[in-house]
Amino acid sequence: MITSNIDQINNRIKNICESCGREPEHVRLVAISKTHPEETIREAYDAGIRDFGENRVQELTSKMNHLPSDVIWHMVGTVQTNKIRDMVHRVDWVHSISKTKYLKELEKRAARLDRHIRVLIQVNISDEDQKSGCDPESLPDILEYAAGLKHVSVHGLMGMASFTDDRDLIRRQFRLLRELRDNHRGYESETVRLDELSMGMSGDYDIAIEEGATMIRLGSTVFGKREYD
Ligand SMILES: *Cc1c(COP(=O)(O)O)cnc(C)c1O
């Protein structure tokens, strides 16, 4: 079941890329395994997936200690200062950084373990209060701060579109994220590169790829519907 889901997704990624003139290798599938048990994650692993994402630190830490060491772990949910410590020994990517104070804490914790962590800055592109992410106006400050880090590097932006059937609206929001990325290239430095765009979930990843996503975060299309969130 999971294996055929992944086959279908890979085919769809290929087709979408073909029709918009992109290379499928430039779209990384991050399987969002939240709420699913380790056995289920192993099925996806056996089908070739290596990038997995979780949205809760506790769930992430318990899973990442039990799965193969070549799994690349992505934290995609809201982070808090006091939780950063619990994941920093193993997490590879954090997509959901929205404030300099989290960069500071990550740097401190990663330095102690002599680890390197890659992050994306999450931007609020949907103007919905309940969605997290920084305001576009605060990007310059965050990127300037990131230029002084050693154990943390910024690789791009992450955003979530509105939960809506209005596909034009979703497209405008993804396009906004891409434009923000393009417009902040001037802030690139040794530790800040803006190559990645993490956008697109099960319901809208086709639009995200067309608008330039380099990472798509898919949960239900990979694993089936979640019983809870
Ligand atoms: C759950 C989640 C996803 C995946 O959602 P699906 O609609 O199941 O693909 C992607 N990104 C984040 C931040 C999530 O929390």
Image (cartoon, rainbow, N blue to C red):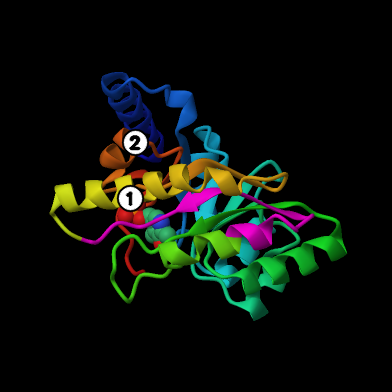
Whether label 1 lies within 8 Å of ligand 1 gets the answer: no
- In the figure, 209 relative to 106: above or below? above
Q: Please, which residue is most extreme toward the bottom here?
A: 82
Q: Position of residue 192 (x, y in %)?
A: 64, 48
Task: Using the image, determine if residue 58 lies above or below residue 52.
Answer: below
Q: Residue at x 46, y 37 (%)?
A: 214
Q: Is residue 146 magenta?
A: yes
- For mark 2, give the secondary structure: helix
In depth, the one of 175 and 141 nearer the eye is 141
> Residue 169 versus residue 73: which sits nearer the camera?
169
Q: Please, what is the three-letter code of the amino acid marked with disc 1?
A: Leu
Q: Report the span colored magenta.
A: 143-163
Quadrant in the picture for residue 147: bottom right
Q: Say whether residue 119 is left or right of residue 199.
A: right
Q: Out of 176 and 23, give the one closest to the viewer.
A: 176
Q: Residue at x 40, y 56 (%)?
A: 159
Q: Nearer the viewer, mark 2 or mark 1?
A: 1
Indicate whether 1 appears above or below 110.
Answer: above
- Determine which residue is flagged by label 2: 209
Residue 218 covered by magenta stretch? no
Instruction: Point out residue 204 in the picture as x, y percentages from the top left corner.
Output: 26, 46
Distance between the alpha carbons at the discs numbered 2 and 1? 14 Å
In this view of the protein, can residue 175 be seen by the observer?
A: yes
Residues packed near mark 2 inside 10 Å, few (<14), some (14 to 19) or many (20 plus): many
Residue on which disc 1 sits: 176
Residue 170 x %, y % = 23, 51
The image shows residue 121 at horizontal and vertical percentages of 53, 58
